[in-house]
Image (cartoon, rainbow, N blue to C red):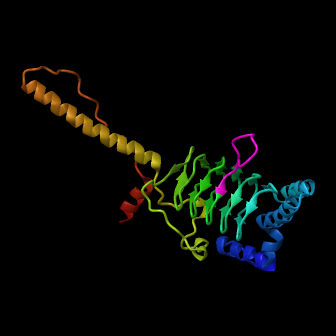
Amino acid sequence: MFSRLKEDIACVFERDPAAQSVFEVITAYPGFHALLIHRFSHLCWQSGLRWLARFSAHVGRFLTGIEIHPGAQIGRRFFIDHGMGVVIGETAVIGDDCTLYHGVTLGGTTWKKGKRHPTLHNGVVVGAGAKVLGPIDIGAGARIGSNSVVLKPVPAGATVVGIPGHITDPKAKKRTLALDEIASKMDFDPYGLTADMPDPIAHAINRMLDHIHVLDKQINTMKKVLNDAGMSCSEPPVPNLDGCEIADSYAKDKNEKE
């Protein structure tokens, strides 16, 4: 028990630079308190003391603003930063070294009994306000951006943003992270976001614009051939789409600095 407590306290210092002392973590971190209360309520739930489990979870919600169903399964070194408004459903499964921020919901999409909530594999980070809904798998090391709504499985190592969630780089290689590297400052992405993250919507629109430009050139070539052959094509010219691309602000700033 004491080794688990040491792990829980140590992971706070690894992932929250604002933490000043062990005493502060023990007395003033609601995520730490919610985890301790959940362990008691989960033990009661497994022992068949369902009312006591629900009541202790209810007390934990009142004290911390974090609602964790006593049936949820949570791994080691789990960290909830800030915590207010976090909801974790009954059949949710959370692996080791996962991090949740305030306003996160691990919810269900059906009223039927059975597996209704998501499974987070090791090292997953879910940003503030994100909603992960349904019995889906979030692969190891995945990042869920703030305020995203995720309804489909996410592969290991991927980063998802948007409503509904989109993988920022579908061709990115899946990465397998060692447990001791997941919480390190070099690899840890607070809120599941980084400044240089590509915008999948802008990328898709720009690809479509590139496709339209190619089609325009082909049509103009065909019209020229028809005109040269004596077949008049006098339709108005197709409007020019130059300047319609959606710029990546990060890439622009980076180029300006260079």
Examine the image and state in which quarter residue 252 appears.
Answer: bottom left
Instruction: Please tell me in which quadrant of the rendered image residue 47 appears.
Output: bottom right
Residue 91 place in picture, x, y as percent = 74, 53
- Residue at 74% x, 41% y: name it: 112
> From the image, which quarter does the N terminus lie in?
bottom right
Q: Is residue 108 magenta?
A: yes
Above or below for 197 versus 21: above
Q: Is residue 176 above or below residue 127?
A: below
Bounds of the magenta segment:
107-119
Tell which residue pokes out farthest to the left in this image.
229
Quadrant where the C terminus sits is: bottom left
Q: Residue at x 61, y 72 (%)?
A: 183
In the image, 141: left or right of 63?
left
Whether the magenta-drawn stretch holds residue 187 is answered as no
Residue 65 % position (x, y): 81, 56
In the rendered view, would you say 36 is above or below 52?
below
Give x and y (percent) for residue 104.
69, 53
Tag count: 0
Q: Main secondary structure of the magenta part?
A: loop
The percent position of residue 61, horizontal first and vertical second, equals: 84, 56
> Image point 60% across, 49% down: which residue?
148
